[in-house]
Image: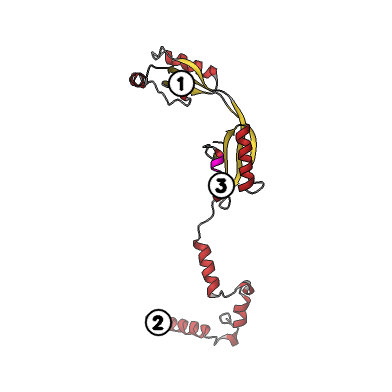
Amino acid sequence: MLRFFVLLLLLANGLYFAWTQGWLRELGVGPAVQTEPLRLGQQINPEALRILSPEEVRRVDALAIAPKASPPECLEAGLFDNKQSAALRQTLETHLPVGSWTLQPGVQAPRWIVYMGKFANADAASKKKLELKGRGVAFESLRNPTLEPGIALGGYETQAAANQALKDLTQKGVRTAKVVQEKPELRGDTLRLPGVDEKLRPMLEGINEALGGKALKSCGK
């Protein structure tokens, strides 16, 4: 029985070998013929292949490792009064391309604060700040130097909001604070640069002086 299986295995191997060599094609069986025309027919868009020159290879490599340019950024600055806007417009027309900037009418909301002061001197203001820290009352720097030496216990866009904040602070033991307007509403022009790209950015150095210390910031911030 074992001899029969061995003979059967040898016969199967012999038939497979004959099939792979194509010796059984006359009987209508055999592997697919892999001829050169068949391989050419299986190619996809062979006409699109092109051998690059050494110079083209270097150019492609340089593009692959080159840093990607940052997307254009919208920047703005302001507000500028009529005199500042006139001087800024002349500078913009000289240093920046046409259509890369606009001067738009803008409004800066007033600022109301809960205020303590004026104190007799800076030392008195410092002592009051230590007292406020002990009570857990937050404070911030004044934005209007004419109110120094003093302390701002919070800034608000409306007088009503500042009055409510003062009422809340009174419950914390703050007795001598009051609501004052730190800055009035301002109207003027806002400089807007909607598409600052890598080409335009170096040109902005030419307008720094005309900005008068007003920093360019991302639009909407």
Q: Which of labels 1 and 2 is toward the front?
A: 1
Which residue is painted at 54% across and 67% down in the image?
A: 60
Tell me the kind of residue under disc 2. Val
Query: Residue 135: where, in percent of width, then height?
Result: 35, 18
**Residue holding disc 3:** 206
Most common secondary structure along the magenta stretch: helix
Above or below, 140 against 94 in this view is above
Q: Which residue is mark 2?
A: 6
- Look at the image and give the residue range highlighted in magenta: 206-210
Residue 202 seen in the current view: yes
- Local SS, label 3: helix
Q: Give 86 or 168, whichever is nearer the viewer.
A: 86
The residue under label 3 is which amino acid type? Gly
Q: Residue at x 50, y 15 (%)?
A: 163
Q: Residue at x 49, y 62 (%)?
A: 65
Q: Dot 2: few (<14), some (14–19), or many (≥20) neighbours within 10 Å?
A: few
Q: Residue furthest top?
A: 175
Residue at label 1?
A: 147
Q: SS at mark 1?
A: helix
Q: Is residue 178 above or below residue 77?
A: above
Q: Find out whether residue 96 is within the magenta segment.
A: no
Q: Secondary structure at mark 2?
A: helix
44 relative to 187, above or below: below
- Of the pair 8 and 142, the residue shown nearer to us: 142
Query: What is the CA distance from the residue labelled 1 to the residue labelled 3?
Result: 35 Å
For marks 1 and 2 on the same chain, the one whose residue lies earlier in the sequence: 2
Dot 1 and dot 3 residues touching (CB under 8 Å): no
For the N terminus, the quadrant is bottom left
